[in-house]
Image: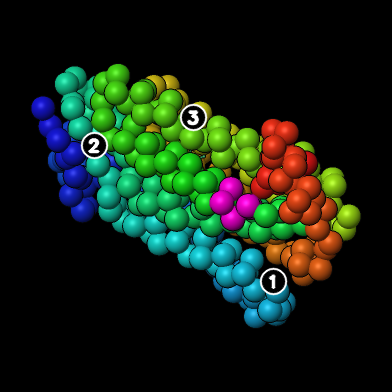
Amino acid sequence: MLDLVTIAPGATRAGAHAGLGALPSAANSLDTTVLWIGCALMFLGLLSFGYLRLRKATATSRGFYDKSILIVAAATCSYLAMALGVGSVHPVGIQTSSDLAHRILLPRYIDWSVTTPLLLLDVILFSKPLLNEGWQWDAALVVVFDVIMIVTGIVSGSINGPARWFFFWASVGAYAVVSAYVLTLFLKAGRITERLVAGKLRTLTGMLSVLWLIYPFVFALYFGSIINGTTEDIAYAILDVLAKVGFGFVLLLGPAVELVDKTPSVAPKADESARGASRGGRVGIAR
Ligand code: RET
């Protein structure tokens, strides 16, 4: 049984597909090109968000610019590492030669474990007018479930055999919690009195819900041997660019980020929400 065989620098994922395991081989150029393009697009996003921050950020909106910059900076590093062949490992427990066909690119998951909480914080803080007492606790819980989703995803991709699918479904379970929270914000966005903030929140939560839903399908198709590693890389690259750079532009362009803090809260007052909670209502988001 082989354990976590790391493909040496200079060796490539192409070798894994050819069933060559850790042996160095010629690069799969399409795969590598996709990763370099991903790196370039993330870097362009970084420059754009940096420029927007210098031109437009104010004391109240600065946090949204900073998070967007951190998100694309992390992704630039992760795509650079993947393009250079760093951190591509075979799952443990290889029993058959077809098990050798899969690999997991660790920089991708390390990137997600940092950037998905930041993306969630973006939508949560953008929903401020909807949130009442207790929202910080909800936000912390959502981020914890998000991290559980990524960590169980890493474990799922790192083992062969039935245990992979156990962890896959655990990850989907954590994803369902995150997704339910974001959908609640989507459904309640219309209550926000400032039209621009309400509309933008609907776009952001809608975009997040649709894009994030595709990731587990790509994962299952790849580890179910229905698509190969190159198709997986292309799909993730498109999703990542939309979910980070596209999302960042939608968030930062226009006046909405400046208006969030000035928008009156529509959440019930503390005593009302306590009564709501005792009737089984939710405390963290306006009912
Ligand atoms: C995994 C493992 C299989 C099950 C699920 C997953 C969900 C991944 C998601 C990733 C989102 C990434 C984003 C990245 C950057 O912008 C980990 C593939 C549910 C939702 C938005």
Left or right: 84 as drawn, with respect to 171: left
Left or right: 250 as drawn, with respect to 68: right
Q: Position of residue 275 (x, y in %)?
A: 75, 42
Q: Residues within 10 Å of mark 3 (few under 14, many from 20)?
A: some
Cβ at disc 2 under 8 Å from ligand 1: no
- Can residue 193 be seen at all in this image of the molecule? yes
Q: Which residue type does callout 1 highlight?
A: Ser
Q: Quadrant of residue 15?
A: top left
- What residue would you read off at disc 1? 61
Placement of 198 over or under 145, stated as above or below: below
Q: Earlier in the sequence, mark 2 or mark 3?
A: 2
The answer to which of 5 and 67 lies nearer the viewer is: 67
- What residue would you read off at disc 2? 90
Residue 173 is labelled as 3
What range of the chain is rendered magenta?
134-138
The C terminus is located in which quarter? top right
Left or right: 106 as drawn, with respect to 6: right
Residue placed at 31% from the left, 36% from the top?
155
Q: Is residue 210 magenta?
A: no
Q: Position of residue 149 (x, y in %)?
A: 44, 39
What is the C-alpha distance between the residues marked 3 and 1? 33 Å
Placement of 3 over or under 142, stated as above or below: above
Residue placed at 55% from the left, 32% from the top?
176
Q: Position of residue 13 (x, y in %)?
A: 29, 41
Residue placed at 73% from the left, 33% from the top?
279
Placement of 54 over or under 181, stated as above or below: below
Q: Earlier in the sequence, mark 1 or mark 2?
A: 1
Cβ at disc 1 under 8 Å from ligand 1: no
Coloration of the structure image: rainbow
Q: Is residue 137 magenta?
A: yes
